[in-house]
């Protein structure tokens, strides 16, 4: 079994399946045709080749609009097959879907809340820090005295106290842009939730 794709532009130059191995090759432009001839003979070039045995692959993912296929394999490692041509990318994904044994294919459509989970968590963390810092800043402004237990000023509490000592106005100026960035990021991701093709390979 040999299947080879030679790509142009900002793509992995050669992607190949030889028997039960998936290869990504990055030869120099002038060496690409020679790489193809070698692979067709079921030989493997000595340099500029990365190979993944089928038995190592746990999952393939392709997010609509992205120019790569994610490959997850043993040890929680990840590799990308980068293919600029959307039709060629889908062709490679479909071939692997039909070729990889014991695979289950489905389309994973994210809900808005799931799509914006990371910036939402960031917003929550920043908001808590803002409230904490503002509370201390107001206390300092009113004449209260604060210190960090054990004088560990490189801790979260130490950093909060350092920012609070800058004054209420500066605390607001520091945290407002951070919260605005998190809100904007959440809004953009929630409005455009990803659609993911996923191929999960079960190991028996």
Image (spheres, grey):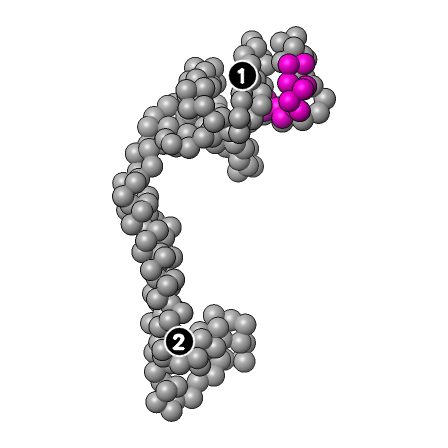
Residue 24 belongs to the span the image colors magenta: yes
Q: Position of residue 142 (x, y in %)?
A: 34, 89
Q: Which residue carries the number 2 mark? A: 170
Indicate whether 12 appears above or below 184: above
Q: Which residue occupies 67% across, 14% down?
A: 34
Left or right of 33? Residue 168 is left
Residue 130 in view (yes/no)? yes
Left or right of 157? Residue 65 is left
Where residue 2 sits, quadrant-wise, is top right
Q: Nearer the viewer, residue 41 or 29?
A: 29
**Among numbered discs 1 and 2, the one appearing first in the sequence:** 1
Q: Position of residue 146 (x, y in %)?
A: 44, 85
Label 2 crowd (10 A; few <14 / some 14-19 / many >=20): some
Indicate whether 1 appears above or below 120: above
Q: Nearer the viewer, residue 92 or 169?
A: 169
Q: Nearer the viewer, residue 188 or 164?
A: 188
Q: Which residue occupies 47% across, 27% down?
A: 84
Q: Which residue carries the number 1 mark? A: 5
Residue 100 belongs to the span the image colors magenta: no
**SS under mark 2:** helix
Q: Which residue occupies 44% across, 79% down?
A: 166
Left or right of 6? Residue 110 is left
In the image, which residues are magenta? 22-34
Q: Position of residue 158 (x, y in %)?
A: 49, 75
Q: Kindly report the distance in space between the C-alpha atoms of the residues bearing marks 1 and 2.
A: 57 Å
Identify the mark at residue 92; answer none if there is no mark: none
Q: Which residue occupies 39% across, 76% down?
A: 170
Where residue 197 sits, quadrant-wise, is top left
Label 1 crowd (10 A; few <14 / some 14-19 / many >=20): some
Q: Position of residue 175 (x, y in %)?
A: 38, 68
Q: How many marks?
A: 2
């Amino acid at each position: 079994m040999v299947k080879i794709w030679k790509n142009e532009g900002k793509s992995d130059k050669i992607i190949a399946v030889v028997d039960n191995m998936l290869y990504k090759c990055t030869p120099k432009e002038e060496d690409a045709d020679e790489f193809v001839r070698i692979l067709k003979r079921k030989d493997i070039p000595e340099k500029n080749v990365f190979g993944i045995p089928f038995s190592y692959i746990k999952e393939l993912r392709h997010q609509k609009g992205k120019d790569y296929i994610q490959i997850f394999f043993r040890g929680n490692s990840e590799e990308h097959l980068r293919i600029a041509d959307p039709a060629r990318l889908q062709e490679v994904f479909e071939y692997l879907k039909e070729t990889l044994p014991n695979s289950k294919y489905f389309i994973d459509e994210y809900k808005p809340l799931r799509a914006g989970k990371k910036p939402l968590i960031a917003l929550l963390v920043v908001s808590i820090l803002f409230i904490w810092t503002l509370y201390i800043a107001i206390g300092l402004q009113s004449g209260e005295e604060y210190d960090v237990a054990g004088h560990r000023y490189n801790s979260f509490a130490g950093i909060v106290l350092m920012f609070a000592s800058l004054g209420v106005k500066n605390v607001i100026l520091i945290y407002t842009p951070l919260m605005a960035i998190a809100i904007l990021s959440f809004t953009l991701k929630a409005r455009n939730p990803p659609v993911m093709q996923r191929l999960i390979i079960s190991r028996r």
